[in-house]
């Protein structure tokens, strides 16, 4: 048998080629197809920190527009509504600079609750009574609480959108 024929008949070559032809896999994310529009209500806050609820709501809207097939709509015409509340924001120091007695790294934890509800049927599609996200920032390199919160709120928005994906 010719060397070329022997090469193509080898199981080490043919099995990976068969596997690469695909088995119906898709790169689209599994969002519900019965929902076309969504309204994101301004999040509420139990915290007395300025504008966190505005920033979180804005991050969620941007993430939905970027990562989902859903369009934003007014509450009265939306297929679904997303509501939520910031429950707590806590900071803790991971380590102190012994010379300056200042924190070397600060960890922030943000806890929220949210609900995605189908406005047509009243069915609750997703509900998380306590959803926690953690991040950290480093003051000695110029990072501030605002930088840490931006990272936390963006990360939280991304995970909320992931929770909106339909189950397999």
Image (cartoon, rainbow, N blue to C red):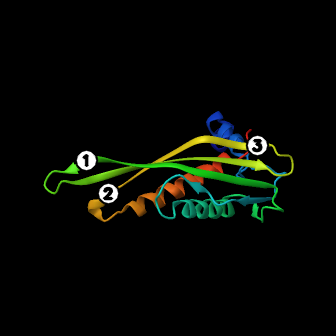
Spatial CA distance of label 2 from label 1 is 10 Å
Camera-nearest label, 3 or 1: 3
Spatial CA distance of label 2 from label 3 is 39 Å
Q: Going 32% across and 57% down the picture, which residue do you hit? A: 138
- First-in-chain label (3 vs 1): 1
Residue 16 position in % (x across, y down):
65, 40
Q: Going 56% across and 43% down the picture, which residue do you hit? A: 131
Q: Nearer the viewer, residue 119 or 134?
A: 119
Quadrant in the rendering for residue 57? bottom right
Q: Nearer the viewer, residue 109 or 151?
A: 109
Which residue matches tag 2?
A: 138
- Circle 3 SS class: strand
- First-in-chain label (2 vs 3): 3
Which residue matches tag 3?
A: 124
Q: Going 51% across and 64% down the picture, which residue do you hit? A: 51
Please indicate whether residue 85 sits to the left or right of residue 70 in the image: left
Please indicate whether residue 151 sits to the left or right of residue 28 in the image: left
Residue 122 position in % (x across, y down):
82, 46
């Amino acid at each position: 048998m010719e060397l070329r024929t022997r090469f193509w008949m080898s199981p080490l070559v043919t099995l990976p080629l068969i596997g690469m032809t695909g088995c119906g896999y898709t790169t689209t994310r599994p969002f519900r197809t019965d929902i076309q529009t969504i309204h994101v209500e301004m999040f509420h806050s139990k915290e007395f920190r300025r504008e966190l609820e505005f920033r979180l709501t804005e991050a969620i809207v941007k993430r939905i527009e970027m990562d989902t097939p859903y369009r934003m709509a007014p509450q009265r015409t939306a297929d679904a509504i997303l509501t939520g509340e910031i429950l707590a924001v806590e900071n803790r120091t991971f380590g102190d600079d012994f010379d300056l007695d200042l924190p070397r790294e600060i960890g922030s934890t943000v806890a929220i609750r949210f609900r995605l509800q189908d406005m047509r049927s009243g069915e609750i599609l997703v509900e998380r009574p306590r959803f926690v996200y953690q991040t950290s920032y480093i003051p000695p390199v110029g990072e501030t609480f605002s930088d840490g919160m931006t990272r936390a709120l963006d990360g939280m928005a991304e995970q909320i959108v992931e929770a909106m994906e339909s189950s397999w």
